[in-house]
Amino acid sequence: MQEGLRTEVQRIAALALFLVLFGWANGYPLTTLLVGGTAYMLFTLHRINRLYAWLASDSDDLPPEASGVWGDISDYLYRLKKRIEQAKRNYAALALRIRQITSALDDGLVLLNADLSLDWWNPTATELLNLRDTDKGEAITNLIRNPLFVHFIQADTYAQPLELNSPYDPARILQFSAGKFGRGEVVLTIRDITRLRNLEEMRKEFVANISHELRTPLTVLTGYIETLQGDLDRLPPHWQRALKQMEQQAGRLNVLTEDLVMLSRLESTSPSPDRTPVDLCSLLNAIVDGARVLCGETHTIDVKCEPGLNIPGESRELHSAFSNLIFNAIKHNPEGCNIDISAKKTEKGIRVRVADDGIGIDPKHLPRLTERFYRVDDSRATASGGTGLGLAIVKHVLNRHNATLKIRSTLGKGSIFSCLFKIPGNPGKRGK
Ligand code: ADP
């Protein structure tokens, strides 16, 4: 038994004994016991009342003086009250810190309740979305009515961020990202990406302009080189070597310029809405015929194409994408390699695969392979005449044709480049 409780029990026992003895002495033992017990109960109630008043008060005073079990209870409650006050202070300091951090953020932050009504937002969100204090509790879809945004926020996935012109300043481009937390609440972040997009636009324009500007001087240079080659026999040997090199480098520059022009066009124009069906087998066979002529049968190329396959799209772009994959398999792999090209309809769509049993690519390069100018080995790619733009073109063309590129490769064993064209209206693979 606890010390305080024991003292209290002893005190009650002593009081009861005293009352019985006193009552017995004056001839009214029971009445004395009853009166004394009632007085003790009233005294206890008075102590409870004082303790309760102290607990309810916000003051820092010590608890009312008490002994025995009431002293223990008062001490315990005092320590508990102190601990709660400290926790409250810590919580308030943390809340202030979080408010300061979120106020310093360049990104807008909005917390939405599970019913997508506004709960809280930081100052940047106020500025970006023109929010007012009275908007608290308002549905976000009443403030941003753009159907794309409504669809984005009402979908549960939030896998991809959404880019939109600001509803209050169309010159501003905002990027919205969202995520769920707690009991279905949503945290929405808003980033002003106007500068980033403007810079990207400038870069695209710069590359498009420079590659167009390069075409004319290149045509003149190539023309002179061809003219001079007509008189090759009359030139001294060191000039002949120089001319050969000039021809090679002008050729490389030509390929680079053409790739840059193609890439700029893919980036800066939207795909044409009226697409004509492109006969896949004729396209692949035409590319392979050209490749066979160029590589002079150094590689074994096999084509398996399911007849009648059509892809709605731009024949020129698809030609460029498949040529890049097929010519890559030739130029990046040694003589004697086998290249298998196949096209077939699957549950997920039309799959075109270019597989080779050549040198393969180290897996560490795969995530960056479709970046412009990315080359696995600079010296090897330069020797093979690569620009590092081929797979970037492939990726862009596939994007414009609702298709995806998957690359699998094993060093020393070969690579597989697989393009999957989703067919409009095709529900894809169904769960069993
Ligand atoms: P490039 O103009 O150099 O071919 P790409 O973007 O087409 O540029 O390819 C990027 C790099 O990927 C190439 O430099 C090459 O190292 C590697 N690569 C592409 N295809 C193959 C392949 N079939 N086998 C081995 N390496 C490949």
Image (tube, rainbow, N blue to C red):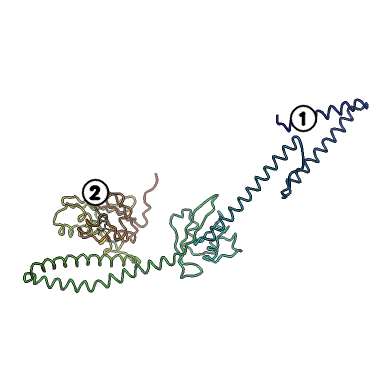
- For the point 48% across and 63% down, the residue is 147
Q: Which amino acid, mark 2?
A: Gly
Query: Mark 2, mark 1: which one is toward the viewer?
Result: 1
Location of residue 208 in the rendering, given as x and y in whole percent from the top left corner: 31, 69
**Image check: 308 left or right of 4?**
left
Nearer to me, 14 or 291: 14
Nearer to me, 42 or 325: 42
Q: Is residue 162 visible?
A: yes
Q: Which amino acid, mark 1?
A: Val
Q: Which residue is mark 1?
A: 9
2 or 1: tag closer to the N-terminus: 1
Whether the residue under disc 1 has CB within 8 Å of ligand 1: no
Q: Which residue is mark 2?
A: 414
Alpha carbon distance from label 2 to label 1: 89 Å
Identify the disc placed on residue 287: none
* Secondary element at image label 1: helix
**Crowding at mark 2 (Cα within 10 Å: few <14, some 14-19, many 20+):** many
Q: Is residue 273 visible?
A: no
Location of residue 374 in the rendering, given as x and y in whole percent from the top left corner: 29, 58
Q: How many marks?
A: 2
Whether the residue under disc 2 has CB within 8 Å of ligand 1: yes
Q: Can you say whether 379 is above or below 196 in the image?
A: above
Location of residue 428 in the rendering, given as x and y in whole percent from the top left corner: 37, 51
**Crowding at mark 1 (Cα within 10 Å: few <14, some 14-19, many 20+):** few
Q: Can you say whether 58 is above or below 109 in the image?
A: above
Q: Quadrant of the C terminus?
A: top left
**Image check: 304 left or right of 21?**
left
